[in-house]
Image (cartoon, coloured by chain):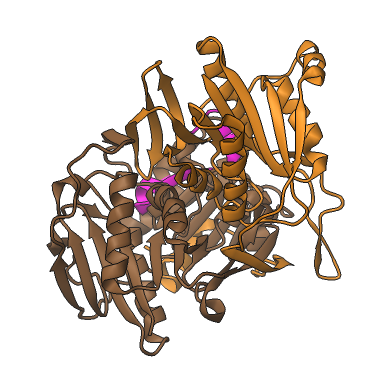
């Protein structure tokens, strides 16, 4: 029998949406693997009511609600996850692919002698009982990986998020873990956590309006900000734009930036370098606006408009304003 | 201060990855230093310049052809290089294990004060080797740092997380994996290139004693098949996105 353990990540008491989505996707995976059992680990204090109606299916949730786990600490977290894994009798451990899991999982892999597959999608996980496929070489190839160890770990990238709000009733058992935080100071120690207030992270956005070098200047992005504002989305940028200093690296989508999976990805004046395309492979609907009808971005787009963004975008903004007013 | 830097080679970003009869063909690829490793090396050299009597030693698990890349790294400020040559590809765990053995052999009883690695290699992007190495060496580590303030006693580093920035206190010895934005790597000068020729590169043929944790069973060309529907105007786009796809 397989037992899956899903790590639920919280920052400032808020459980990450990526973690909740992950739980629900692994739940689907468990449903197609007879005899599979589900468990989850939530590290750090958090109000459990935020999970009401958001976690599907059944399972056991282990909650380490000690104050000491509020901030990430690699040593403390590694110990907690290792102990929870044993307690749950889990053979497979899933993390959302985040800065935290990219820091923690390789350490755990060595400590537990577990195979670690980074950056997979859950759909691909479990190929032949433990493996995954994911793009390599800047997105120009796809590789199949096989986990050789009995214990397997995945850090998983999001799948295009659905905007539907249907929820099924969950029956989760919550077990509070007995105190296991070691009081000693283990370094590195997080001294400060400064969250950018009021700004949605591009990696978690449902709608992304991204711009490339063709936007022309930093000021050119005001059109995209307006559009993102209308749609309740987030602005993204291609690498040249970040290299030019028009936008921050936190907004960069691509090989040296973030991998995203929004329901809608609007690519404006982005030609579509393989490194960029690899990072939007899991997006839902892709719309491209570009002057060049042969731009690679159209190869991955569902809808395309050939034209100058400086002419097309103001029109699009106008149409949207009208549409949203009527509704 | 003893500073170690781990370097690897990747196809340069302008290289075309081709397939011959379905099989990956890297013969036309130009191998260069992994871009993130350049940031790692630059930061190591900056620490060396900050703290007197520092030595920067480079470690690379790569084929013998990586000498050229190491020459460039020496020109950028490394003092000597160890090339751990392997004949077959290794997984991240095996790579980290070889690096940890080479570092332990080289430094003897004491660990280096600092180890720098790139955040990940741009070809496979697992980003596992640096932290696995830290675990094997029993060192503190922080991944993907964007800022480093070091004194003789301790360090303060910053790293980007989703939607914010973490500031961490770190003690020596420590390992860092380095994110883009930490620094701007220097250009090598003719003088530095000449001096680098006199710096030692030691070849150390090695084989992995451990089985891999992960194996690659196939690499195929990635074909993105989406049929783009070109629209005449934005009105139709708004209609499709709102009515057909219910996106807003």
Where does residue B158 sit, x and y in percent of width and height? Answer: 39, 31
- State the extent of the magenta-drawn residues as a range: A227-248
The colour with which the image depicts chain B is orange
Q: Identify the image quadrant of the N terminus of chain A.
A: bottom left
Q: Percent position (x, y) of residue B228? A: 64, 66
Using the image as rendered, state which of residue A203 and residue A67 is in the foreground. Answer: A67
Residue B39 visible in this rendered orientation of the protein: no
Q: Is residue A238 magenta?
A: yes
User: Which color has been applied to chain A in this rendered view?
Assistant: brown
In depth, the one of B227 and B130 nearer the eye is B130
Is any atom of residue A166 visible in this view? Answer: yes
On the image, which quarter does residue A288 sit in? bottom right
Taking depth in this image into account, of A191 and B196 the one nearest to the observer is B196
Q: Position of residue A190 (x, y in %)?
A: 29, 36
The C terminus of chain A, quarter of image? bottom left
Say if A18 sits above or below B48 in the image: below
Question: Is A164 in the magenta?
Answer: no
Total labels drawn: 0
Q: Residue at x 61, y 23 (%)?
A: B56
Q: Measured along the vertical axis of the image, is residue A122 above or below residue B177?
A: below
Q: Could you tell me residue B38's position as x and y percent?
A: 63, 31
Residue closest to the far front: B109
**Picture quarter containing residue A162?**
bottom left
Q: Is residue A306 left or right of residue B88?
A: left
Left/right placement of residue B67 relative to residue A39 reads: right
> Residue shown at 54%/23% (left/top)?
B2
* Residue A156 falls left or right of residue B226: left
In the image, residue A171 sits, relative to residue B43, either above or below, namely: below
Task: Identify which residue is drawn at 65% across, 30% down.
Answer: B58
Viewer-nearest residue: A182 or A171? A182
Q: On the rendered structure, is A68 left or right of A197?
A: left
């Amino acid at each position: 029998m397989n037992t899956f353990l899903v790590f639920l990540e919280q920052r400032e008491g808020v459980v990450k949406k990526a973690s909740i989505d992950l739980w629900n996707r692994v739940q689907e995976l468990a449903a197609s693997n007879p005899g599979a059992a589900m468990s989850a680990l939530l590290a750090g204090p958090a109000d459990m009511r935020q999970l009401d109606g958001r976690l599907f299916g059944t399972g056991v949730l282990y909650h380490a609600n000690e104050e000491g786990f509020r901030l990430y600490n690699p040593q403390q977290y590694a110990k907690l996850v290792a102990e929870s894994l044993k307690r749950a009798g889990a053979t497979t451990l899933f993390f959302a692919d985040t800065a935290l899991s990219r820091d923690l999982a390789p350490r755990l892999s060595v400590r537990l002698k577990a195979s670690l597959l980074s950056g997979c999608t859950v759909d691909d996980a479990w190929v032949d009982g433990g493996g995954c496929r994911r793009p390599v070489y800047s997105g120009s190839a796809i590789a199949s990986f096989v986990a050789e160890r009995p214990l397997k770990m995945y850090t998983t990238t999001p799948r295009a998020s659905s905007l539907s709000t249907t929820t099924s009733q969950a029956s989760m058992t919550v077990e509070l873990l007995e105190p296991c935080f070691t009081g000693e100071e283990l370094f590195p120690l997080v001294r400060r956590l400064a969250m950018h207030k009021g700004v949605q992270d591009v990696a978690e956005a449902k709608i992304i309006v991204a711009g490339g070098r063709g936007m022309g200047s930093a000021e050119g992005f005001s059109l995209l900000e307006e559009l993102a504002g209308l749609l309740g989305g987030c602005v993204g940028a291609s690498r040249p734009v970040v290299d030019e200093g028009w936008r921050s690296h936190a907004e960069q989508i691509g090989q040296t930036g973030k991998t995203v999976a929004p329901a809608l990805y609007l690519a404006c004046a982005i030609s579509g370098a393989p490194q960029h395309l690899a990072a939007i492979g899991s997006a839902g609907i892709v719309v491209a606006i570009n002057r060049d009808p042969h731009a690679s971005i159209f190869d991955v787009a569902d809808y395309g408009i050939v034209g100058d963004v400086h002419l097309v975008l103001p029109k699009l903004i106008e149409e949207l304003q009208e549409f949203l007013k009527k509704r | 201060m003893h500073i170690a830097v781990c370097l690897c080679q990747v196809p340069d970003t302008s290289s075309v990855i081709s397939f011959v009869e379905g099989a990956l063909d890297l013969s036309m690829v130009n191998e260069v230093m992994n871009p993130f490793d350049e940031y790692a090396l630059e930061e190591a050299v900056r620490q060396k310049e900050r703290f007197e009597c520092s030595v920067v030693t480079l470690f690379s698990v790569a084929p013998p052809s990586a000498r050229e890349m190491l020459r460039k790294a020496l020109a950028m400020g490394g003092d000597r290089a160890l090339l751990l040559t392997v004949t077959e590809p290794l997984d991240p765990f095996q790579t980290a294990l070889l690096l940890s053995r080479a570092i332990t052999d080289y430094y003897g009883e004491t660990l280096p004060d600092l180890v720098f690695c790139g955040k990940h290699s741009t070809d496979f992007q697992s980003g596992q080797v640096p932290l696995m190495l830290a675990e094997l060496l029993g060192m503190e580590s922080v991944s993907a740092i964007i800022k480093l303030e070091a004194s003789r006693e301790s360090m303060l580093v910053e790293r980007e997380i989703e939607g914010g920035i973490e500031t961490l206190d770190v003690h020596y010895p420590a390992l860092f994996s380095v994110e883009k934005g930490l620094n701007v790597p220097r250009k090598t000068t003719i003088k530095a290139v000449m001096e680098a020729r006199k710096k030692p590169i030691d070849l150390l043929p090695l084989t992995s004693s451990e089985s891999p944790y992960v194996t690659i069973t196939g690499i195929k060309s990635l074909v993105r098949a989406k049929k783009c529907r070109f629209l005449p105007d934005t009105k139709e786009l708004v209609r499709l996105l709102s009515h057909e796809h219910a996106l807003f």
